[in-house]
Each structure stands twice: as C-alpha cells, then as structure tokens.
Amino acid sequence: MRAALVQLNVSDDLAQNLAATRGYVRQAQAQGAGFVLTPECTNGLWSNRAVQRSLLRLESEDETLAALREDAAHLGIWLLIGSLALLTGDEDGRFANRSFLITPQGDIAAKYDKIHMFDVNVSETEVYRESAGFRPGTKAVLAETPFAKIGMTVCYDVRFPHLYRRLAKAGAQVLTVPAAFNHITGAAHWETLLRARAIESGAFVLAPAQTGFHTETNGKGRRTHGHSLAVAPWGEVLADGGTEPGVTLVDLDLFKVDDARRRVPSLTHDRDFDGP
C-alpha cells in the first residue's frame, strides 16, 4: 500500500481550506496513493471561540466531511480525515475534535474523538486550553481495513503511550497521529515521540501535520511545526514532509510489523508489579 501524508497550512477560511485539501488529495491519488491522510483540524484553526462557533457545523451538516467523502469515492481511495472541529449539541456547548476513516466507496468506516486535551502553558505568551472549547473523547478506536488494522489517535494523544500499547495489543499495524503540533514543543519532542510510539508498538506511525503560521481574520493566529512523518515499526523515519504544505509519499510493507514484533516481542512481556 502506498500512503500519502497531506501537510496543510489552514486558516480560518473553511472554503479556502477545503479547496487546498481537495487539491492535495487528488495529487496524492494521482501519484499512486491508495491511503491518503490529512492532518488534525483539516477544516480550520481558530483562537477565537465565538468566531469558531459561528462557522462550525454538526457532523451531518459539515461541508468538508461531505466533500471529502465524495472525493474518496470518486478517486477510489481510503482517506483518513485527520480531524474536523465539529459542533456536538452537548449541553456545555463544547465541540468535537473528530477523526474519520473513509472507505473507497465514500462511507465512514470509523471515527474517533480525540481523548487527550492540549491544556498546557508552552511559554508565558503561549497558553492553550483545548478542553475549554472541545470535549474529550472516551473511546479508543481500532479500524479494520483490507490492507491493515489502523489505530486512530490525534496529536496530543502521542504523549500517552498506554493508548498506543492498547491499540497495538488489540492488533493495530498502523497508528495514525494527525496533528497541529505546536512549533516549540514540536521542535523539541515531535520526532522523538513518534519514533518511540512506533518502537514500543512495533507498528507503522503515520503523522500528517499542519505547518507554518495560520492566519485568522478575527484572532491572533498560531504557528505549527510541520514535518509530517512516517515511521517504520523498527523506529526509522521513512519520510519527512519538511515545513511546506504538500504531499509526502511512503510505501508500507506490513511484513515489517511482523518482523519487528518477532525480533522484540515486548507486547507479550507485560508483568504485574507492586507500587508505587
């Protein structure tokens, strides 16, 4: 299977973001990809919650989801929409950060709501409270496809190895980590975390990313790290998307999953222990 990581630089303009995404998805399919992945927040990034609320839609009404489902069917590809910000109808008014796996028929094969919220003080001037706008998911998701079992995660999840271990022990051969990773923490931790999750799990890690400075009409904007990565089960980086928007291709050989897990069968070596 040839996979393609789509790297985006979205703004707060839904239509503009969708047009760019569709163009890259078509480019990826034209280059032979049968599995195309987009990053977290494919439909847009906003720091102003009021503006975001005015633009977002429920899953059943979301134009980005509908258009990309149509494209997957037209192109005959598997498509991971890394995540979309969506209205939920929850009583507290919080949104969902939801990842979708779309079949070559345009159907939703699986969906996953990001579990871990990015509530951090990166610096004195960069403070994030994702949980103020988004409600966390509660369920890990393993999707079965004809070419691989896929464990679905999103961005900040990558700092919680127990999630990946559970997915791997359930049979995941490919772990998806679509992201809009902060440029400061990304420079320090992004590659190391992704390689660690691949090594611990003996699985491929595919991490399409947002990149660059994301402009907003009614907000301050933000900067993301880029460097969409594909990592092999033995931990080597197979592809790096750099810092420009575009498409990065990688060929997946699932024999490498079996080989890594045979050589170091740590997924079968768990032991109970006491303390602390």
Image: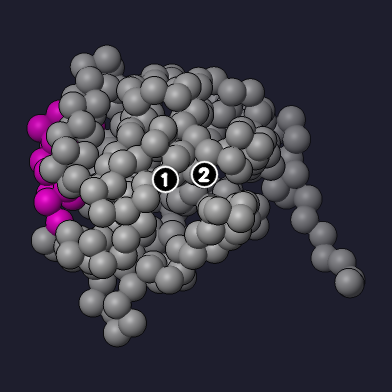
Identify the residue position indicated by label 1 in the image. 222
Question: Hey, which quadrant is residue 120 in on the image?
Answer: bottom right
Name the secondary structure under disc 2.
Answer: loop
2 and 1 marks in contact (CB < 8 Å) = yes
Q: Is residue 71 above or below residue 250?
A: below
User: Does residue 27 appear in this view?
Assistant: yes
Above or below, 182 against 23 in this view is below
Residue 208 in view in this figure: no
Q: Is residue 203 left or right of residue 14?
A: right
Q: Few, some or many C-alpha atoms within 10 Å of disc 1 (few <14, some 14-19, many ≥20)?
A: some
Residue 251, image x, y percentages:
43, 19
Q: Determine which of the numbered discs, if any, sits on residue 22 in the image.
A: none
Region rendered in magenta: 62-77
Residue at 18%, 47% in the rendered image: 14
Q: Quadrant of residue 274?
A: bottom right
Prevailing SS of the magenta stretch? helix
The percent coordinates of residue 270 (x first, y second) are 77, 56
The foreground one among 142 and 16 is 16
Q: Which residue is mark 2?
A: 182
